[in-house]
Image (spheres, helix red, strand yellow):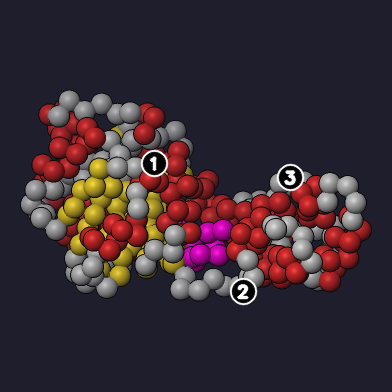
Amino acid sequence: MNGMDDIATPRRTKEIIQRHGFSFKKSLGQNFLIDQNILNKIVDAAGLDSTKGALEIGPGIGALTEKLAQLAGAVTAVEIDQRLIPILEEVLAPYPGVKVHHGDVLKTDLAALFKSNFAGVSKVSVVANLPYYVTTPILMKLLEERLPLENIVVMIQKEVADRMAARPGTKDYGSLSIAVQYYSVPELVCIVPKTVFIPQPNVESAVIRLAVREQPPVAVDDERHFFEVVQASFAQRRKTISNNLKSRFFPKEGRERLDQLLQAAGIDPSRRGETLSIEEYAVLSNLLRKEGIGLN
């Protein structure tokens, strides 16, 4: 298709919307991209070719889907809004390799979807302009289910992207940073102005790439326990790690023991949770678990 026919232009987007009588649902966080340059940056960051597959979440009217279809060997788009299905079928008609799945990605059996739709490709990346109100649950589902993914390249709220890529000791660093970095290596691709969307969102956006790790960067004895310790450490950011963990694990007795264990792990009890690296959390979690503190 030539540039004149691309979906991601203000003229073509408005024409498709008007012809189908489509109205935006705020509850679904619908903001359609109308900028070719940004779309190209998203697709380039995924490193797709004809041997690879792409999973898109929330394709809207198919602006990004069209780009993916021109590059990837197999494309599946998951769309929750029934009203968009006929529009997608129409605009994606020139691309028989694209499959549109109507459903909520949070309730979709993604392992089964991968098996049936991506059997013929070597690697799969998620490439999407995510609805901002469910960004974190979607990304954590993709990472926690350990799907055979190469990259996750997504447009999300800039504030959330900053938190995902944050380093220890910074104001954005928290339990989300650690969770994302446990499963992937995050890299900010670009900042995106509000003006490249219809309608314009109220927040600044960013494209982030999460290169999915084959193995976590640290060895933990129990992942659930590790994440429980991390969550507890950030319960109240102004409190020391000692006080946060005491509140969570020692409502009454045994509090002195915790400070001894923190010191045994090489961690000063007066430090705050945001100063600890993922490696320090791994050491601490393994030690607390060995002592029977935390999950049963």
Name the residue carrying label 3: 236
Q: Amino acid at mark 3?
A: Gln
Q: Is residue 260 magenta?
A: no
Q: Amino acid at mark 1?
A: Pro
Q: Position of residue 20 (x, y in %)?
A: 15, 29
Q: Amino acid at mark 2?
A: Ala
Name the residue carrying label 2: 219
Q: Is residue 184 magenta?
A: yes
Q: Earlier in the sequence, mark 1 or mark 2?
A: 1
Q: In this picture, which residue range is highlighted in magenta?
A: 179-190
| Foreground residue among 179 and 289 | 289
Name the residue carrying label 1: 131
Residue in view at x 57 percent, y 53 percent: 176
Left or right, 162 with reference to 91? right
Residue in view at x 60 percent, y 63 percent: 223
**Local SS, label 2:** loop
Q: Is residue 155 visible?
A: yes
Left or right, 232 with reference to 255? left
